Image (tube, rainbow, N blue to C red):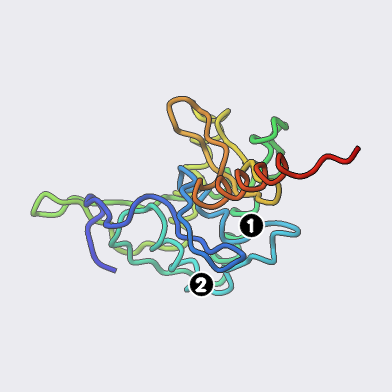
Amino acid sequence: MSGRAGETPDRTPGLTLVSGQGKPYRFDPGTLCLELTVTGGPGAFARWEVLHEPADLVTWAGRSRLPDGLELTVSAGELERARALRDAVFLLAADRAHGRPLRADQLDIVNAAAAAPPLVTRAEPDGTRAWAPGATGTHLLATVARDAIDLFTGPFADRVRECGAHNCHLLFVDTSRPGRRRWCAMEHCGNREKVRAHRARRAPVEP
């Protein structure tokens, strides 16, 4: 990958996902830690797992909202800890979205990851900013975990949402000014639910 940490990425924030019908759509969960939750999850969500080997975590980092130019080395152990952190953030975000207390065991996983040194940037002679060399999976997870702590304890803690579609569980933080975001993406679940509601209204009513 190329580019500087201080430069504006060519891509817009968010990730390109693919629907069950094979149609790509853009999903912006609003924060780095929730971008990690699209890579799989606990329980029934394990079927969506994409972090199978260390290179998969490197690929995710390159597609995330982190600035370009990060050269990352990930070990098998760090990949395992990444999945554990991902599952913890997933469960904590779901608890926030549904007004449930946060679970201490999941917070312990996040706090432990956050205690490690995070990714570091440095100033270049030309006045730009770049990633410091030697970045590891542990540094990446510390950065993600600290982002999660900022989310769950910050001003948007009560804006964590689960998509309002009947069969979608994607999690996001609603950073819009009115705070009325309901869908993971309007082009995906928003349109699907509008069509579904329209068909329900037009369905004949049994006597």
Vertical relation: 133 (above or below) 204: below
Secondary-structure class at tag 2:
helix
Q: Which mark is residue 54?
A: 2
User: Relative to residue 92, is residue 133 depicted above or below?
Assistant: below
Q: Quadrant of the C terminus?
A: top right
- Picture coordinates of residue 155, whole percent (x, y): 49, 26
Secondary structure under badge 1?
helix
Picture disc at residue 84? 1
Furthest-left residue in this view: 126
88 or 183: nearer the viewer:
183
Q: Are marks 1 and 2 in contact (CB under 8 Å)?
A: no
How packed mark 1 is, by other alpha carbons closer than 10 Å (few <14, some 14-19, many 20 or more), is some
Left or right of 19? Residue 42 is right
Residue, x 48% and y 42% (percent of image)? 146
- Which residue sits at x=45%, y=60%? 16
Question: Of marks 1 and 2, which one's residue comes earlier in the chain?
Answer: 2
Task: Residue at 44%, 68% (x, y): give it.
Answer: 59
Nearer to me, 187 or 117: 187
**Residue at point 42%, 61% (across, down):** 61
Q: Amino acid at mark 1?
A: Ala
Amino acid identity at mark 2: Pro
Query: In which quadrant of the rendered image does the N terminus lie?
Result: bottom left
